[in-house]
Amino acid sequence: MYRTGALLVALLVALLTVTACGSPRAGSGRKALDRPTPWTAPKGPGGYGGLLLGARWRVDWATVDGRNIDAPPNAGAWVEFGYDNTLVGDYGCTPFKASATVTATTLTVGAQASRAVPDEACPAKERAFERRMRKIFTGGPLAVAERVDDVSMTLKNQRGDYAALQMLWPQGLFGAPWQLQYLIVADATVAMTAGKEVYFVFHRDGTVTGKGGCNGIKGRAAFAGEHVTLYSLTRTTHRTCSRKIMSEEDNLLNQDPRTFTVMTGSGIKFVDETDGLNYFGYHFIRLTGTPPRPGA
């Protein structure tokens, strides 16, 4: 009888030990699921060349043979540099794709993988700009230099022709968590009470996921050139937090579909100026750093 009792106690202790080890601490599982994975830039060459990678840049103007020509409006001409040595873009009338080698100070464009014929319906001025852009990109290695700041660059070939670039979409726009730091309401800013618990993750397929301060959220966003259209958000969870945080989350969800101008600099801004001085917008900063340990 003593042996049977001892055996039962031993089994009970073992069971409790396994259960304690295999179950998360109260609340720890939810925190681990809610916490976004911070974005860390893939390894690049550094320098101004490294700033080109992972971002999309609009072409503001080009200078060829000493003559300036403005780019098509609404970011009709753009280039995007991948970390996989690829370059995609649009000359203004024709999309293109090519291999590209980027160092800290130079860009070398390889053979183009696609040779689409320019659209004859494209306006004459835009076709003229395209011819100059092609000449710049096929004129050998390009020197990369800062034009005004790290969101404006110049690509210059050995003949002295150059293209002026302005950042259109920043590094990590897609797939990285972007903390909604504050709302822009007319000439005022409204900080988010929940801080890092309010973030959006934009995906290339147009979906938006994230957190509104207390609950998970989802929706859609359509990026096109200098503009983004944000559609209504919905909750994916049903938790309750403080009255103030819940009120701010409700306001995020109650926005009608709206088209914003995308602005880059210190983070990204989405600004709708259609109502003049009563404009509205969002200011995001990227959450960066080392991803947390599972369950931490």
Image (spheres, grey):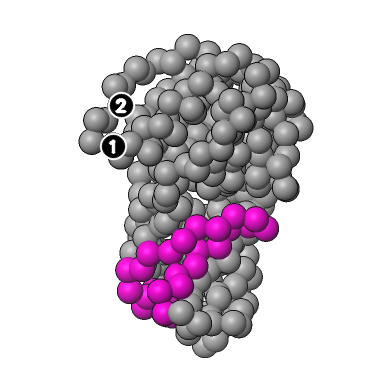
Element marked by disc 1? loop
Assess whether mark 2 and mark 1 are in contact (beta carbons under 8 angstroms). yes
Picture residue at 37% right of the left edge, 60% below the top: 229
Query: Which disc, if any, is residue 286?
Result: none
Amino acid type, residue under disc 1 in the picture: Cys
Picture residue at 48% right of the left edge, 76% below the top: 280
Q: Residue furthest top?
A: 111
Residue 279: x, y in percent?
Answer: 48, 77
Q: Residues within 10 Å of mark 1 (few under 14, many from 20)?
A: few
As for residue 83 lying within the magenta part, the answer is no
Query: Which disc, if any, is residue 118?
Result: 2
Residue segment shown in magenta: 251-275
Picture residue at 61% right of the left edge, 14% below the top: 140
- Tell me if residue 29 comes above or below residue 45 in the rendering: below
Foreground residue among 38 and 262: 262
Residue 146: x, y in percent?
Answer: 73, 39
- Tell me if residue 167 comes above or below residue 200 in the rendering: above
Query: Which disc, if any, is residue 122?
Result: 1
Is residue 213 in sight in this rendering?
yes
Is residue 29 in sight in this rendering?
no
Amino acid type, residue under disc 2 in the picture: Pro
Residue 16: x, y in percent?
Answer: 59, 53
Residue 141: x, y in percent?
Answer: 64, 17
Picture residue at 59% right of the left edge, 82% below the top: 187
As for residue 264 lying within the magenta part, the answer is yes
- Determine the CA span between mark 1 and mark 2: 8 Å
- Tell me if residue 277 comes above or below residue 139 in the rendering: below
Q: Residues within 10 Å of mark 2 (few under 14, many from 20)?
A: some
